[in-house]
Image (tube, grey):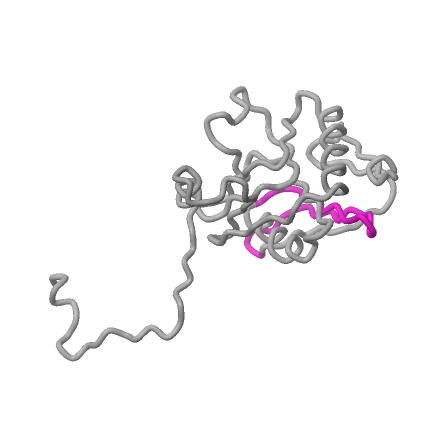
Amino acid sequence: MSASASLSPTSQPTARTSPVRRLWSVADFHRMGETGFLDPEARLELIEGELFEMAPIGSFHAGIVRILAEKLRLGAGNAALVDSQNPVVLDDHSEPQPDLVLLRPRADYYLNEHPRAQDVLLLIEVSDSTAQFDRKTKVPLYARHGIPEVWLVMGPRRRHVEIYRDPQPECGTYRSRSQLREGVLVPTLLPTVEIHLDELFIG
C-alpha cells in the first residue's frame, strides 16, 4: 500500500489531548552541547531520556569526593582508574555523571569514548541532598545495566554508606543491600582498596 493510501477515506487524525513527552538520546544530548543549545555552565545528566539538572555541590559533598578520590587512588594503584564527576554511557538514552567511579584500566584513558557499564568496577554517589532520587532512580538504573557495586554516601547529618552489590538487571535491583556507619569498606572487585569510615567522616 502506498503512503498516500494508508488511511481509509473515513479515517480522521486523532486529536491530541495532552503534550507528547520528548525523550532525548545521548547523541541528541551531545549535539545540543556542541551547538550551544545547552548552557555550558549547567550541570546536566541524561537519565532514561530525560535531562536532570544536578544539585549544586556543597562543601561536604566536595570534601567527601576529595577524600574518597585520594583513598581510592592510593588503594587501587594501577589496578583501576579513578574518575570523578565524568560521564558514563549506559545506553542510548542514559549518560549519568557519578561522583566517583573505579574503571577498568585502559591504555587510552578513555580518550576516544566515554566509559560504559562494563568498564565500571565500583560507582559512588555522594547523596547529601539527593538521597531519594539516588535510591529510587539511579540505583535501579545502575542495577539494570549490571554495575557490580554502588555506594551511596549519606550526610552530613546521617554519615553512613549504603552498599549495593550483586545486581539483578532483569529486576533493576541489587541482591545485597547493607548499611555501614563504622569500620572499613572494601570494594568486592578491588580488595586492595580500604576505606576507613572514621577517616571519611571527619570533622
Residue 160, placed above or below residue 106: below
Quarter the C terminus occupies: top right
Q: Is residue 83 above or below residue 31?
A: above
Q: Give the range drawn in magenta.
A: 146-171
Q: Is residue 8 above or below residue 127?
A: below
Q: Residue at x 58, y 41 (%)?
A: 97
How many numbered tags mark residues here? 0
Quadrant position of residue 12: bottom left
Residue 132 located left or right of residue 178: left
- x, y percent for residue 101: 64, 36
Magenta stretch holds residue 156: yes
Foreground residue among 148 and 54: 54
Residue 16 position, x and y percent, is 33, 73
Image quarter (top left, top right, bottom left or bottom right) of the N terminus: bottom left
**Relative to 6, is 58 on the left or the right?**
right
Q: Residue at x 68, y 34 (%)?
A: 189
Relative to 185, residue 167 above or below: below
Q: Which residue is drawn at 24% across and 73% down?
A: 13
What residue is shown at x 43% (from left), y 55% (from top)?
A: 23
Between 191 and 46, the one nearer to me in the picture: 46
Residue 122 in the image, given as x and y percentages of width and height? 66, 37
* Residue 112 in picture, x, y percent from top left: 46, 26
**Is residue 67 left or right of 41 when viewed as pictured?**
right
Please name whichever residue, 45 or 88, is drawn nearer the observer in this view of the structure. 45
- The quarter holding residue 57 reads top right
Does the segment drawn in magenta span residue 182?
no
